[in-house]
Amino acid sequence: MNDDRQERVEACNRRLKELLLRYMDRPELRPSAVDGLVLVRREESNSMERCFEKPLASVVIQGCKQSTIGTRKYILHENQCLVSGVDMPSISNVVHPGAEKPFLSVFVYLDRNILTDLISEMEAEQRPAFQADEGVSVADVEPEFFEAMLRLVELLDRPNQIAVRTPIIMRELHYLLLVGPQGSTLQSLYTHGTQDSHIVQAIAIMKQNIASPLRMDTLARQLSMSISSLHRHFKNITGFSPLQYHKQLRLYEAQRLMLVENERASNAALAVGYESVTQFNREYKRMFGEPPHRDIMLRRSYSW
């Protein structure tokens, strides 16, 4: 990156630090008034966070973060951008933050419709060559993307402009990702007819039919793929086999039902397709480290 581009990145970083520290005077993960924009401040080391995250683009503004997304490990430093193109289980913790120098980041959720529309409108020369790839990529943030992200965050000081300007800036952010160094990951996933785009469809089918048993032959037929090809491409993108992914999807959804909608463990288990509550409790504890009731109690006691 040349000096001018580096100066633009550093200027955006300084301004975003100023804004995030002003907006958040304590540790929190804050969904903002701008739809799809989330602000993060953390001050504790070794505070592991687990979630089943939607597609997103996340930029570290201050500090360092270690994440396992799917089965792969990533380390994000200041002014680096992580792009995740599909729904993925994520485990992360920040490295050596503190009250005087907290970890700060900002991310936006990606919109599948915007991505597919932009790809269909782009000229051939705007489409970088792509090949089957994993569903996550990390790179130094591009100044154009950083500047657009800053404009989005600055809308929080202009609430009367949010409704009109948010869709414009969000579309620009999606476009800059597609034509940037991480664009091949997204283009392979959201270009109609590619093998990777079939995996995006497979995940959508699993989410829509979360309580139904996963039948590989039926899923492969819906996607016009062989079972072996589906299994190979799915694992390449997510790090999991379809069956492993489906199990995690169910358990995370059950956790959400208990945590957000106050469902009892037995009701949550049935809602995501478990016929045996005993089996659900066993698999839940294996994944989250605690049985359902205790896990939810602990999560509600967390204070950021």
Image (cartoon, rainbow, N blue to C red):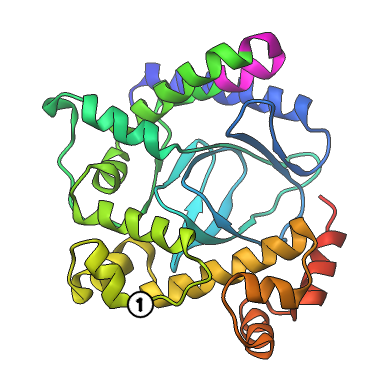
Q: Quadrant of residue 270?
A: bottom right
In what element is the residue under mark 1? loop
- Percent x, y for residue 136? 39, 52
Residue 128: within the magenta?
no
Residue that extends furthest to the left in the rendered view of this protein: 124
Residue 116's x, y, as percent? Answer: 30, 35
Q: Is residue 80 above or below residue 10?
A: below
Give the answer, above or below, for where 253 lies relative to 111.
Answer: below
Residue at 68 percent of width and 9 percent of height: 160
Magenta span dominant secondary structure: helix
Whether residue 180 appears in this view of the structure is no
Would residue 140 appear left or right of 297 to someone viewing this image?
A: left
Q: Nearer the viewer, residue 144 or 55?
A: 55
Q: Nearer the viewer, residue 99 or 189?
A: 189
Give the image location of residue 164, x and y in percent.
56, 12
* Image quarter of residue 30: top right
- Residue 199, relative to residue 165: is it above or below? below
Task: Confirm whether residue 135 shows in the render.
Answer: yes
Would you call the spot at circle 1 few (<14 residues within 10 Å), some (14-19), or many (20 or more)? few
Mark 1 belongs to which amino acid? Arg
Q: Which residue is mark 1?
A: 215
Q: Observer-nearest residue: 233 or 103?
A: 233
Q: Quadrant of the N terminus?
A: top left
* Residue 157 falls left or right of residue 59: right
Residue closer to the observer: 159 or 214: 214
Membership of 158 in magenta stretch: yes
Residue under the image location 29 percent in, 37 percent down = 181
Q: Is residue 116 above or below residue 218?
A: above
**Residue 74 screen position, x and y as percent:** 46, 57
Q: Which residue shows up at 79% across the image and 71% down it?
A: 264
Magenta range is 151-161
